[in-house]
Image (spheres, rainbow, N blue to C red):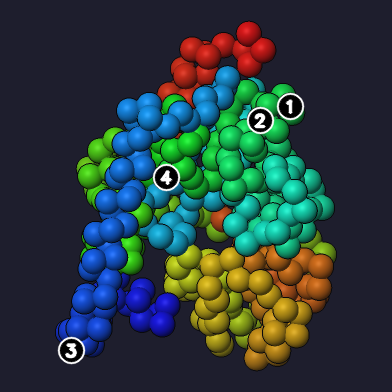
Amino acid sequence: MAALIEKFWFGHHPKGFMLLLNVLFWPVFWPLSKLFGFISVRRRNKYQTGEKVAYRAPVPVVVVGNITAGGNGKTPVVVWLVEQLQAKGLKPGVVSRGYGGKAPHYPYLVEDKTSTDLVGDEPVLIRRRTGAPVAVSPKRSDAVMMLLEHDVDVIITDDGLQHYALARDIEFVVIDGQRRFGNQQLLPLGPLREACDRLADVDFLICNGGKAQKNEAPMHLQPSALINVKTGERCSINELENIVAMAGIGHPPRFFKTLEELGVTPVHCQPFTDHQAFSEMELKHLAQQGQHLVMTEKDAVKCHAFAQSNWWYVPVDAVIPTSNATAIINRIIKVKEEYGSPSA
């Protein structure tokens, strides 16, 4: 059912098939979509008018989110921001909801050996890639307060654009450059968490792949040498033969297309749902269809404990043009200077 709904949202299928989906979904989803929109706008208005009070941190808060359901490439942007700010001498910390994890308590501080079972895949990936303090909590203000105890001077939230209980200074929206906004309808009739006019209110729009439109900073994900999930050994993807590819991200075809652009044709491509937990036997069986199993970095953090010697992942880095990158970092630094020292 989930796959059918996604096809309905994003189209690009034969007219007859789309007509059938319209007949199936519009009568049920249209009234639910209107209700969702009413509740969403009403909730945001309560924070904007002061009827509900948002928590304001003593340091700048930068939100990296989107207005569509599913993954659009937010985490690589978060990693990029952290690394850019660290290079400027700042001390960023990252807040995440911890989707897919079941921590024994919240807020929960992510450490180098923290399991994805506790906090989800993205917080573990961010921690291991950047070394920055990462805290998870469904109530993001609690995670922020935890990070303030760890000498951070900028907070970056991975997702949370619609979490208005946390006040923010700068907002990013990451857009899937291929799928864009689908049928531009609100959930569940379409993929939108908020209407497209919300884009006019954010500070930076980043287009992940595809063709960036006016006022959007273009971004692409640059893959580097493969890393062995078990040993950490590096090698070129062109050194491997009979590759089986897997991806448990928001839009798996994006990863498979990356491999194609690298000149690799896997013997089998296996998509999984975003944040899916993997079993050792499941992936061993999948790997047996070729000589090597190649996955995303986000998948790798979930199966490190039982990885085999022929399992590899492809790390990717967000690449943003210098002019856009400079404007983004300078804006954050300016806001940081306006706040002054966290202890002031």
Q: Which residue is mark 3?
A: 16
- Write down the quadrant of residue 261 in the picture: bottom left
How far separated are the C-alphas under marks 4 and 2? Answer: 19 Å
Disc number lying in front (3 or 2): 2
Q: Are marks 1 and 3 in contact (CB under 8 Å)?
A: no
Q: Are marks 3 and 4 in contact (CB under 8 Å)?
A: no
Q: Residue at x 46, y 28 (%)?
A: 53
The quarter of the picture where the N terminus appears is: bottom left
Mark 2 residue crowding within 10 angstroms, few (<14) / some (14–19) / many (20+): some
Q: Secondary structure at mark 3?
A: helix
How far across and how far down the image is residue 58, in percent?
Answer: 58, 19
| Pick the front one: 153 or 270 | 153
Q: Secondary structure at mark 4?
A: loop
Residue 145 badge:
2
Drawn side of residue 222 relative to residue 11, left or right: right
Q: Are marks 1 and 2 in contact (CB under 8 Å)?
A: yes
Q: Residue at x 66, y 30 (%)?
A: 145
Residue 305 badge:
none
Mark 3 residue crowding within 10 angstroms, few (<14) / some (14–19) / many (20+): few
Q: Which residue is mark 1?
A: 149
Q: Which residue is mark 4?
A: 162
Mark 4 residue crowding within 10 angstroms, few (<14) / some (14–19) / many (20+): some
